[in-house]
Structure formats: structure tokens, C-alpha cells
Image (cartoon, rainbow, N blue to C red):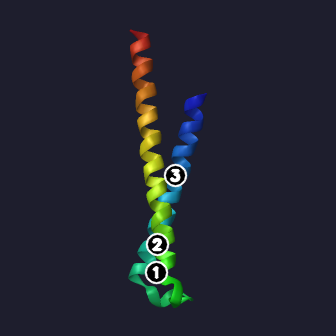
């Protein structure tokens, strides 16, 4: 049951990574489409910070899932 929550969080963070990556990529490739040019650096930084947090969280979740799987294998032996 614990793993089910971790898998759900994993999917949430994967979606956030995709969202933040696409927004940063769009801003960098097409800044003309951004309505508030004065805050473009702040906006990109904000999204990049969120991307970094989501990426680290996903790595930690993957580590937890790997450890749980290893523990399960040991218990079966």
C-alpha cells in the first residue's frame, strides 16, 4: 500500500517535470510570446526552481522504490 502512494507521487512529479521543462523551453525558444517581458528572468527562474525540486523528489522516490523492491527480494529468500 505504501508503494502505491509512492507510485502516485512518482507520476505527479513526472508530470510536473514535463510541465516545467516545456514552459522553460518555450520561454527560451520563443520569448516574444511572453506577455510580461519585464519578469521573464523571474518567471524562468521560478519554473527552473520548481523543475529542480520535482527532479530531486523523483530521484528520491525512485531510490525508495528500489530499496523497497530490494527488501522484498531479500524477504522472499
Other-residue count near label 3 (Cα within 10 Å), few / some / many at <14 / 14–19 / ≥20: many
Q: Please give the residue where the numbered disc 3 appears in the rendered image.
A: 13
Q: Are marks 2 and 1 in contact (CB under 8 Å)?
A: yes
| Above or below for 29 versus 3 | below
Marks 2 and 1 sit apart, C-alpha to C-alpha, by 6 Å
Q: How many marks?
A: 3
Residue at the (49%, 52%) spot, across then down:
14
Q: For numbered disc 1, what is the local secondary structure?
A: helix
Q: Please give the residue where the numbered disc 2 appears in the rendered image.
A: 45
Residue at the (46%, 80%) spot, across then down:
41
> Is residue 60 toward the left or the right of residue 39 in the image?
left
Q: x%, y% of residue 66?
A: 41, 31
Q: Are marks 2 and 3 in contact (CB under 8 Å)?
A: no
Other-residue count near label 2 (Cα within 10 Å), few / some / many at <14 / 14–19 / ≥20: few
Q: Are marks 3 and 1 in contact (CB under 8 Å)?
A: no
Query: Which quarter of the figure is the N terminus placed in?
Result: top right
| Above or below for 64 versus 12 | above
Q: Please give the residue where the numbered disc 1 appears in the rendered image.
A: 41
Q: Nearer the viewer, residue 46 or 68?
A: 46
Q: x%, y% of residue 8?
A: 58, 42
Quarter of the image holding residue 26? Answer: bottom left
Of badges 3 and 1, nearer the viewer stands 1
Marks 3 and 1 sit apart, C-alpha to C-alpha, by 24 Å
Query: Which quarter of the figure is the C terminus placed in?
Result: top left
Amino acid at each position: 500500500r505504501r508503494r502505491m502512494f509512492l507510485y502516485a507521487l512518482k507520476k505527479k512529479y513526472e508530470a510536473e517535470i514535463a510541465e516545467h521543462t516545456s514552459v522553460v523551453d518555450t520561454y527560451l525558444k520563443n520569448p516574444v510570446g511572453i506577455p510580461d517581458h519585464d519578469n521573464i528572468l523571474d518567471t524562468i527562474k521560478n519554473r527552473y526552481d520548481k523543475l529542480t525540486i520535482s527532479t530531486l523528489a523523483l530521484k528520491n522516490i525512485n531510490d525508495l522504490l528500489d530499496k523497497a523492491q530490494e527488501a522484498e527480494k531479500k524477504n522472499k529468500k
